[in-house]
């Protein structure tokens, strides 16, 4: 196999079939969609000019990021808005050669902002159908609790998820701030969700230390961890995550842009990989962070000097850690193997 040239690396990453396990629906709104919404909703305080929006998407810290995120969320009012976001995300995923994504939706926030539940569900359903038919991208949903809104949000999210149980709903999550928002208070809702067959995928260790990740594992039965960045400072936790195959949904550019890490080079991803963790690469809130899925692979591969086989391993990790059925996983893994074999023959 020849040494990876920049062009070769780009072509390889592009050719790999990929899955995305950590992307928020609101945070996936394209710049064009946000500008269009901002023109219709001046009261939201979101800039309607491109240069101003770029500035608006420059985050001082994580709390500032969340305020901006909530401002964008507040502009979504009906099924058409949700449909636009879902199909826009599918088009963006297709452009990255991503075949499947588990998309985080926060029903409680939309309901609180005044969107009827039926509007949300209808937009998700029609958007998901169009994503598959027009873009060849399969979408699944993670309904998550906005942690800052406490146990009431936990209960309501659970009730909504289990009552509505829309097609494609596979998992139950927990997002928002971590500091001052203990994971354990949400344990009863995660227990009930898991008993009903939903998988547990809380955010943890993005903006707080390893104790939050331990709590996500012990109290919430986490099967994957959203971010998990701070695990690298706890050798016992690294051992535990590796031994139990609990995958990390790593979002390097997100962590840089919310100022949780200095740079991709300073990200603990190397320690995670060296420790044998199941690392997956994801975008979180792509247009807000100027991120793309291929860009995340390229940034990590370039920074860590990964070989093609190691890059393919990362793509395979995401397939294996997904909640796809075994048959579809096997197809995607075979395609990844073929892509790598094609590279070896060059
Ligand atoms: N909601 C949207 N993006 C988020 C993130 N990166 N962490 C927690 N909650 C979020
Ligand atoms: Zn997230």
Image (tube, rainbow, N blue to C red):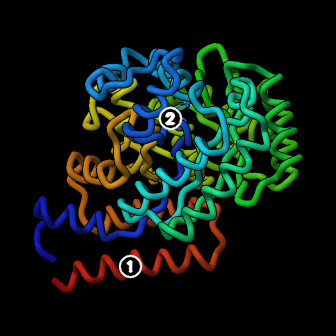
**Residue that appears at 32% across and 25% down:** 49
Q: Label 1, on which residue?
A: 337
Q: Residue furthest bottom?
A: 345
Please state which of residues 62 and 267 is positioned toward the viewer in this rendering. Answer: 62
For residue 52, above or below residue 334: above
Report the side of 210 relative to 273 (left or right): right
Secondary structure under the numbered disc 2 in the rendered image: helix
Q: Label 2, on which residue?
A: 231
Report the side of 148 relative to 262 (left or right): right
**Residue that appears at 56% across and 27% down:** 75
Mark yes or no: residue 283 visible.
yes
Other-residue count near label 2 (Cα within 10 Å), few / some / many at <14 / 14–19 / ≥20: many
Q: Residue 89's mark?
A: none
Front label number (1 vs 2): 1
| Residue 285 rendering spot, x and y as whole percentages | 46, 38
Using the numbered discs, state the Cα–Cα distance from disc 1 to disc 2 in whole angstroms. 30 Å
């Amino acid at each position: 196999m020849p040494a990876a040239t920049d062009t070769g690396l780009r072509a390889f990453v592009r050719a790999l079939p990929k899955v995305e396990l950590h992307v928020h629906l609101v945070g996936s709104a394209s710049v064009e969609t946000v500008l269009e919404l901002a023109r219709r909703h001046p009261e939201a305080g979101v800039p309607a000019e491109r240069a101003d929006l770029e500035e608006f998407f420059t985050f001082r810290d994580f709390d500032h990021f969340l305020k901006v995120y909530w401002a964008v969320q507040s502009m979504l009012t009906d099924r058409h808005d949700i449909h636009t976001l879902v199909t826009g995300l599918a088009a963006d995923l297709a452009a990255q050669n991503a075949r499947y994504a588990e998309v985080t939706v926060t029903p409680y926030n939309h309901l609180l902002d005044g969107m009827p539940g039926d509007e949300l569900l209808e937009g998700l359903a029609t958007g998901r159908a169009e994503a598959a038919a027009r873009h060849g991208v399969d979408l699944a949903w993670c309904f998550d609790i906005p942690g800052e809104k406490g146990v009431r949000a936990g209960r309501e999210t659970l009730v909504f998820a289990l009552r509505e149980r829309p097609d494609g709903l596979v998992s139950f999550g927990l997002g928002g701030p971590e500091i001052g928002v203990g994971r354990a208070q949400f344990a009863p809702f995660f227990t009930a969700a898991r008993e009903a067959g939903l998988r547990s995928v809380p955010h943890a260790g993005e903006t707080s230390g390893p104790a939050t990740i331990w709590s996500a594992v012990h109290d919430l039965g986490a099967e994957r961890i959203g971010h998990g960045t701070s695990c690298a400072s706890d050798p016992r936790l690294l051992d535990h995550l590796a031994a139990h195959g609990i995958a990390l949904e790593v979002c390097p550019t997100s962590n840089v842009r919310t100022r949780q890490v200095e740079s991709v080079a300073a990200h603990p991803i190397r320690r995670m990989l060296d420790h044998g963790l199941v690392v997956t690469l994801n975008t979180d809130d792509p247009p807000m962070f100027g991120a793309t899925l291929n860009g995340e692979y390229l940034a990590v591969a370039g920074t860590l000097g990964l070989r093609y086989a190691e890059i393919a391993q990362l793509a395979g990790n995401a397939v294996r850690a997904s909640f796809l059925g075994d048959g579809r996983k096997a197809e995607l893994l075979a395609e990844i193997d073929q892509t790598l074999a094609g590279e070896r023959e060059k």
